Image (cartoon, helix red, strand yellow):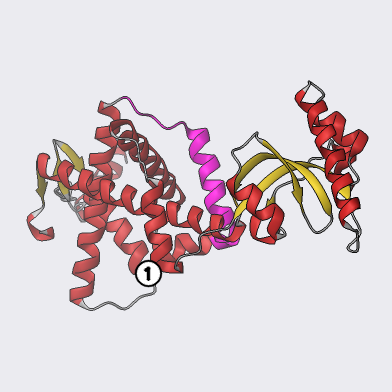
Amino acid sequence: MRIRFVALCLLACACEEPAPRVASQAPAPALAPAAVVNGEEIPRRLVDEAMARRVRGRTLSDRDRDRLLRTVLRDRIEAVLVDAALRSRGIRIPSEEVTLRLARRQEELGGDEALRRFLKQTGRTLDELRGEIGREVGLARLLARRDPLRVDDAAVERVHLLEHGDVTPPLEARFSLILQRLPPDAGPVREKQTRRDLQRILKRIDGGMPFEEAAAQFSQDTSRKAGGQWEYIEIPLLEPGLRAAVESLPVGVLAGPLRTGDGWVLLRLDGRRKSMDREAEARRAAIRERLLAALREERRTKFLKRLREEATVEVAADLR
């Protein structure tokens, strides 16, 4: 019986098909890097993923696809060069600052949803955008450290003149006065008496009496409560008698008695300046910012070009 059971087992084993041999699969060869920049590899996977995001939902011709591929690769190479330049000069942008600038960018775009649309349209990831912001800030600091950006007032004025013409603002004057009023029909006797009254006040001021005290005590103008002082006013708006005086007097000098439409005055010029034209100043500020932005971009372009010329860059044969 035992012999019979063993024989049956041997027969069953003989009838079984031999297990197929599983061929050992060799690992897929690793793709060559898309580029090697000063010995640092740019993995092809990163370029392929960036391309996939930018092409998603678009139909491109072969020519446009090649152009886009070269743009993506150029951006990657530039990022490697800038990062290396910042490291070599010890420039590091804290993550907190990048976060703040990203929040500002998000606000400029119009909020969280607008930021998501921007990332989708441009084929960027949030990490890529953060990296770009950090590099731009670092690059701006590096270039400013080498040669601070400056735009002189003359350059701003030249552009303002070309774009808006000659809009020289009028002069303004600030002055203090002591007024002795006279009616329009005052006769010669009254004129002479009022003029003498002011001459006596002038002698007291020359003798040491503060002008503000004399104005508070003797002036018949509404400015007496402020020591006779007027705030800045455009000179062309003044009546002829006052206008001639404030145009010619040195600052701080007391003149008079002077005849005006209201009577006789003692006048002290306290200051002279160009009129504040807020619209013109806003235009000049915008022009200055434009010139700075253009200068900043020019320096950035030249610096990146020099980095590329001095670097050793090897691009994969199929991506050249």
Please tell me in which quadrant of the rendered image residue 39 appears.
Answer: top left
Q: Secondary structure at mark 1?
A: loop
Q: Is residue 214 left or right of residue 21?
A: right
In percent of width and height, residue 256 lies at 73, 42
The percent coordinates of residue 128 (x first, y second) are 39, 48
Give the image quarter of residue 141. Answer: top left
Query: Badge 1: how crowded within 10 Å, few (<14), some, or many (20+)?
Result: few
The answer to whether 69 appears left or right of 200 in the picture is left
Residue range corresponding to the magenta coloring: 90-114
* Kind of residue at disc 1: Arg
Q: Is residue 130 above or below residue 201?
A: below
Residue under the image location 84 percent in, 40 percent down: 196
Image height check: is 166 above or below 16?
below
Closest to the observer, 237 or 145: 237
Q: Which residue is mark 1?
A: 56
Q: Which one is in front, 246 or 289?
A: 246
Identified at 46% across, 59% down, the residue is 119
Name the dominant secondary structure of the magenta segment. Answer: helix
Quadrant showing the C terminus? bottom left
Position in image of residue 184 (x %, y %): 88, 63
Q: Report the front residue among 284 and 213.
A: 213
The magenta stretch spans residue 106:
yes
- Quick one: quadrant of the N terminus? top left
